[in-house]
Amino acid sequence: MTITNRSYGFKRALTREPSNSVVSGLRTSEGPGPDPNLFKNEHHTYVESLEAHGLDVTVLPPLEAFPDSVFVEDVAICMSSAAVLLRPGASSRRGEVDAIKPTLVDIFDDLITLPGDGHVDGGDVLLTEKDAFVGLSERTDQAGFKALSSVLSEFGYVPKCVETPLDVLHFKTDCGLLDANTIFATRRLARTGCFDAYQVILAPDGEESAANLIRVNDIVLVSDGYPRTKTVLMNAGYQVKTLPTSQAGLIDGGLSCMSLRF
Ligand code: CIR
């Protein structure tokens, strides 16, 4: 299998093992925090699945000082030849950037720090073959969008500033790339029209939380517990594998958040 595109043809991934402090991760709803041991098991399954689909996965050590540090997606954007260090919107997460920097310095000759003082969480950035959708949200602001646009334009992306639906944490909480022309999205996000230039497959009503899926080479990884989503995707011709993400879900995380893929 040789997949040469840049939007889902990947060779490597960076992940970080959940810390015991993950129980204190940021969350928008009341309710129990994750069980660190169960989270570690689910994370292990996630890493194994990435490896099974062709990725060389680096698992970074847990960071007890940063309860949300398992969600590496939010601190950087990785492309094939360069990476961008972001400035997350939540102040409790900013130190995660310094923590991942040495790893990115080792991998990428070209490591760029987001210019200015705006904020961007990687969970608000969806890269397709040519477009860079950046969702404004509680975490990502206009200044961050402008700064990121200037960087991503250099790499041939067309930046698009879009709105994340109200009460949705990140843009990609509500969408995921399926292939170069197709995006899986919730109805509430699709109806903003942001994906009108793409083919859109809608998350079945009641299965909106399945929207944070990831395409990795030949497979679409989807969270467990969304049988209608699985059927819709298989009927559309995709190979689908489901993974447990119950613990990440307790602190508003999902599949995309737990890796940087490039
Ligand atoms: C946070 O609120 O920052 C974490 N508890 C969840 C981050 C999930 N990341 C993502 O969707 N990209």
Image (cartoon, rainbow, N blue to C red):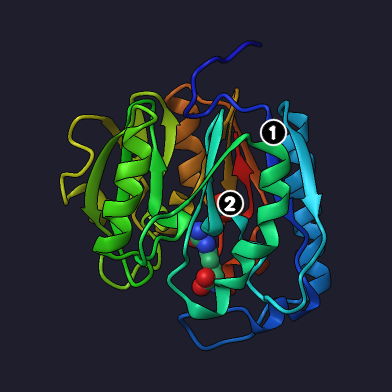
Q: Nearer the viewer, mark 1 or mark 2?
A: 1
Residue that appears at 39% across and 24% down: 180
Evaluate whether residue 252 shows in this view: no
| Element under disc 2 | loop
Mark 1 and mark 2 lie on one chain; the one further toward the N terminus is 1
Q: Quadrant of residue 173?
A: bottom left
Give the labeled residue for mark 1: 12
Q: Estimate the x, y position of residue 241 in percent, counting from the top left.
A: 64, 37
Count neighbours of disc 1 (C-alpha within 10 A) and say few if under 14, some if 14 to 19, many if 20 or more. Answer: some
Residue 255, numbered circle: 2
Residue that appears at 75% across and 56% down: 43
Q: Estimate the x, y position of residue 114 in percent, counting from the top left.
A: 43, 54
Residue type pointed to by label 2: Leu
Task: Answer above or below: position of 54 versus 90.
Answer: above
Residue that appears at 67% across and 68% down: 247
Q: Is residue 138 left or right of residue 121?
A: left
Q: Is residue 184 left or right of residue 188?
A: right
Task: Answer above or below: position of 84 versus 128.
Answer: below
Q: Estimate the x, y position of residue 148 in percent, counting from the top left.
A: 35, 49
Q: Estimate the x, y position of residue 182 in percent, counting from the top left.
A: 35, 29
Along the line of sight, which residue is nearer the eye, 174 or 131?
A: 131
